[in-house]
Image (cartoon, rainbow, N blue to C red):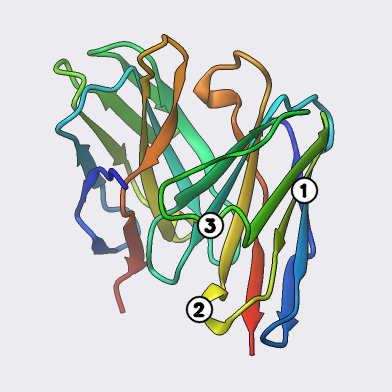
Amino acid sequence: GQQLNQNPQSMFIQEGEDVSMNCTSSSIFNTWLWYKQDPGEGPVLLIALYKAGELTSNGRLTAQFGITRKDSFLNISASIPSDVGIYFCAGQGMNYGGSQGNLIFGKGTKLSVKP
Amino acid sequence: GAVVSQHPSRVICKSGTSVKIECRSLDFQATTMFWYRQFPKQSLMLMATSNEGSKATYEQGVEKDKFLINHASLTLSTLTVTSAHPEDSSFYICSARTSGGRADTQYFGPGTRLTVL
């Protein structure tokens, strides 16, 4: 099925570092969402974006809905050990009939702690 | 946020048997429920969407006779993996949303780890 391009696939962080990841798509989305998934758990919503250009924060997390509606980024400032996990972007478009489309997930960015 | 539960959280079964996974919305009425499958180190792939009281809509490549979905009430959907085989081993995640709800009202369950021996 259709998927988003999410980068980077993985990254190592040291406590206190800022982290940045992004998603791009060839399709336009009406909604962008960012989730975090811990091992053996379901994804938990971090931030939802509904307007092109929208910049939204949730604590140390900031996400933006790209102006072209084909991309989004997520920044984490001053990372802490509990930020470790897998982060997924998801986009939602509109069906031809005008109803909400299904969520399309990126492949994820795995955040690990530097040894 | 709202709570979605799944049961069981983990199941091991023999090849050829059927396994039923339950998904419940605990504090809201879920007119739409989704079933996803996630293989190790991969993303969530939508299997099917179900609306309460009607037949599920399956994604391309997902066998409806193998993955039986029943959305009998506004708080319960079940996924039955029939005649399970080792390649069906995966992490199955459900999510639930109210009718017309925005994307941020689609809540995910904690997942069910299925291992078929």
> Label 1 crowding class (10 Å Cα cut-off): few <14, some 14-19, many 20+?
many
Q: Number of labelled discs?
A: 3
> Label 3 crowding class (10 Å Cα cut-off): few <14, some 14-19, many 20+?
few
Left or right: A48 in relation to A21 = right
Tag 3 residue: B63
Tag 1 residue: B5
Tag 2 residue: B87
Q: Amino acid at mark 3?
A: Glu
| Residue plotted at (37% across, 38% down) | A104
In front of the other: A95 or A10: A95
Q: Determine whether label 1 and label 2 are within 8 Å by CB.
A: no
**Disc 2 is attached to a residue of which chain?**
B
Asked if marks 3 and 1 fall on the same chain, the answer is yes
Q: Amino acid at mark 1?
A: Ser
| Residue plotted at (45% across, 68% down) | B39
Measured as percent of width and height from the top left, residue A42 is found at 59, 53
| Residue plotted at (56% across, 76% down) | B89
